[in-house]
Amino acid sequence: MNDTIAAIATAGGSGTIAIVRLSGPEARQLAATIAPKASFTPRQADLATLYDRNGAMIDQGIVLFFASPRSFTGEDVVEFQSHGGVVIARQILDALLEAGARLAEPGEFTKRAFLGGKIDLSQAEAIAGIIEAKSVRGTQILARQLQGELGEFVDATREALLRILAHSEVMIDYAEEVESPVVEALTRQLEELREHLERTVRSSLRRRGLIEGFRVAIVGKPNVGKSSLLNAMLAYDRAIVSPIAGTTRDTIEETIEIGSHHVRLIDTAGIRSSEDTIEQIGVERSLASLQEADIVVALFDASRPWDGEDRRIADLLEVLPPENVLVVINKVDLPSELDRSSLTRWPQLELSVAQDAEPLIARLETLLDQRGDGEEPMLVSQRQMEAVRACAEQIMLAYMPLEQGELELFSYHIREAIERIGSITHPYEESEMLDRMFGEFCLGK
């Protein structure tokens, strides 16, 4: 934190503007070596000529000075906005490094903001996520987290647990005299907290595609129309279509936009028993895609009678959450032979892929929009998920000691729950975890 760091903050390549950022105790002095006529008035944009150490002009650009502590990192920060392009930004950065700055490590600006108390860890993760978000709804969720929504959730949960812990600590000396209404009241409070935590995890898992992009897998037995559906949705012939069973032997993945959502479409190999080693590998990959997908589009052929292969597809769908499945009855333009009685558990859509796939695209857009619903704050990283799950688990472990009057053990589990939920914003074991997490950020952030 005693070094002054510098990095290019904009993406590589040509652009209108390039930004080079400087942060640390000597930011203003080092900036003055390449912009000697800038005034460095805090929060005032200066048009200044920038020079290298030999006095040669680099560019004419905007210089912005943010005095500590009123900056992103909490330190003195200077930003140079030059004409876009790799060469000019690199010249500015080289001049700053030659003047005494150190090249910033990936994520080091955001790490300094966290260590300086400008943001908590959940807000730091929101910064990383908002850069990678795959939908408008995803950026809105992350923007709320950047403003502290998840931190408020953590604080409220922590306060509730602290109140319960305070009751326990007061009662420890009178454990044998604790009345059942008190135990029942504490149990009820813990149960409400646990349910809220578990609901938050479920809601976050349902909405994770808003940040990462949704995965939609098209599954079915051979020759049911999966590849034709993929081609129709993409509006070009991406997959080979053939009447020969087993033509698609591996998963085919393509990206499209459905409404405001970024979607990874996965055309899977026809699921059936086969002695062909290569085809069987494709079937195994299809089964893996089915488990990983946010939505499974299960195709059935209306023109063919229900058979054992259809039954196998239905059995695979049985283990999935019903809201993750959409059954599509294809080839309804042909005489119907399919018995639909085994498919009533799931929502259905009837169409002919060969004629029009738009009804399916519209239905998928509606389903994906619904994934964005939910009042709970969203957990946007695996680390946050694990922290909330661990907190809920410690609450669960606290029930029995409370019922048996073992208040020391009860208090231990409540303290553990407090520590787990608090780690979302301010972890106890910081150094190694922070280095790993911030090391995954973009250079210049």
Image: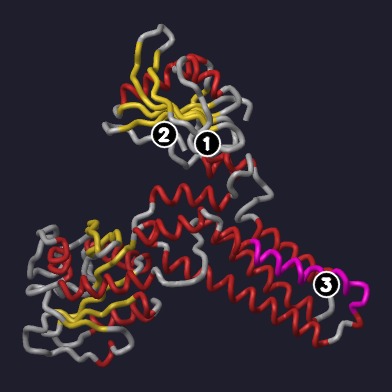
Q: What's drawn in magenta, residue-wise?
A: 155-175
Q: Is residue 16 above or below residue 96?
A: below
Look at the picture and state if 390 lies above or below 338.
above
User: What is the CA distance from the residue labelled 1 to the residue labelled 3?
Assistant: 42 Å
Which residue is at 25% across, 64% downward?
A: 258
Q: SS of the residue at dot 2?
A: loop
Viewed as shown, does residue 141 lie left or right of 289? right
Q: Are marks 1 and 2 in contact (CB under 8 Å)?
A: yes
Residue 109 is marked as 1
Residue neighbourhood size for the residue with mark 3, other residues' Cα within 10 Å, grouped as few (<14), some (14–19), many (≥20): many
Q: Look at the numbered disc 1 and give the secondary structure of its residue.
A: helix
- The answer to which image quadrant residue 412 occupies is bottom right
Counting the numbered discs, the total is 3
Seen as rendered, the residue at the extreme right is 173
**Residue under the point 11% across and 89% down:** 336
Q: Position of residue 363 (x, y in %)?
A: 25, 75
Q: Nearer the viewer, mark 1 or mark 3?
A: 1
| Residue on which the image places disc 2 | 9
Q: CA distance from mark 1 to mark 2?
A: 10 Å
Q: Position of residue 133 (x, y in %)?
A: 38, 54
**Disc 1 or 3, which lies upstream in sequence?**
1
Q: Residues within 10 Å of mark 1 (few under 14, many from 20)?
A: many
Residue 157 magenta-highlighted: yes
Name the kind of residue labelled 3 in the image. Ser
Q: Amino acid at mark 2?
A: Ala
* Secondary structure beneath label 3: helix
Disc nearest the viewer among 2 and 3: 2
Please, what is the three-letter code of the amino acid marked with disc 1? Answer: Phe
Residue 375 x %, y %? 49, 71
- In the image, farthest residue toward the top: 54
Q: Earlier in the sequence, mark 2 or mark 3?
A: 2
Q: Is residue 180 magenta?
A: no
